Image (tube, rainbow, N blue to C red):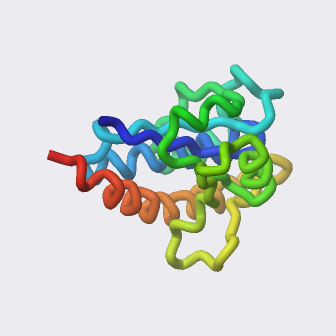
Amino acid sequence: MTYRVCLVCMGNICRSPMAEVVLRQTLESRGLGGLVAVDSAGTGGWHAGDPMDERALEILTRHGYDGAAHRARQFTKDWFDRYDLVLAMDNDNVSTLRRLAPAEVEVRLFRSFDPEAPAGAEVPDPYYGGREGFEEVLALVEAASEGVAEHIADEIRPFRP
């Protein structure tokens, strides 16, 4: 059984693909890579098919991550059936996802898994800023990815051999 998680931002070219790459590597380092599928998407579709923002890719590469294969996708209502966990980068995307979600599906903020983050903390959108914003996003998603990986490990532990 594969546990499936989807990380969601607005256009799927900055925050959520950075988080996808980081979380996937975090899970691999914990020996969970083969048990968990990590995807990302945007609530908007205007970047569908585009690669990751070049600044996001540059920051990831500089820190030893590989995001070159990413292509943006749009999250649609029928995707809720595909995932065990849907995490949004900010409250606007949480609201959009909750309007699409069946009542029994919980949508959470990605940073809610970072024990150092204040309640309601978001991953800010770096798109309209400089490279320093992408560095900040990387630090935030690295911190939250540890907590997400721990949560997933706890979720799948009863099913592990």
Residue 141, above or below 41: below
User: Which residue reaches farthest left?
Assistant: 161
Side (left or right) of 88 relative to 86: right
Quadrant location of the N terminus in the rendered image: top left
Residue lying farthest to the top in this orientation: 49
Q: Position of residue 49 (x, y in %)?
A: 69, 20
x 54%, y 78%: residue? 116
Which residue is rendered at x = 78% and y = 54% of the image? 95
Depicted 54 relative to depicted 150: above or below: above
Task: Answer left or right for 133 relative to 84.
Answer: right
In screen coordinates, is 111 left or right of 133? left
Determine the residue located farthest toward the front in the rendered image. Answer: 103
Residue 4 image position (x, y, % from top left): 44, 40
Locate the C terminus and report the quarter of the image it occupies: top left
Picture quadrant where residue 109 is located: bottom right
Q: Quadrant of residue 121?
A: bottom right
* Residue at 40% in and 61% down: 151
x, y percent for residue 100: 74, 41
- Comparing 25 with 151, the one in front is 151
Q: Nearer the viewer, residue 17 or 106?
A: 106
Q: Residue at x 31, y 51 (%)?
A: 156
Give 136 or 84, whichever is nearer the viewer: 84
Q: Position of residue 7 (x, y in %)?
A: 59, 45
Numbered circles on residues, count: 0
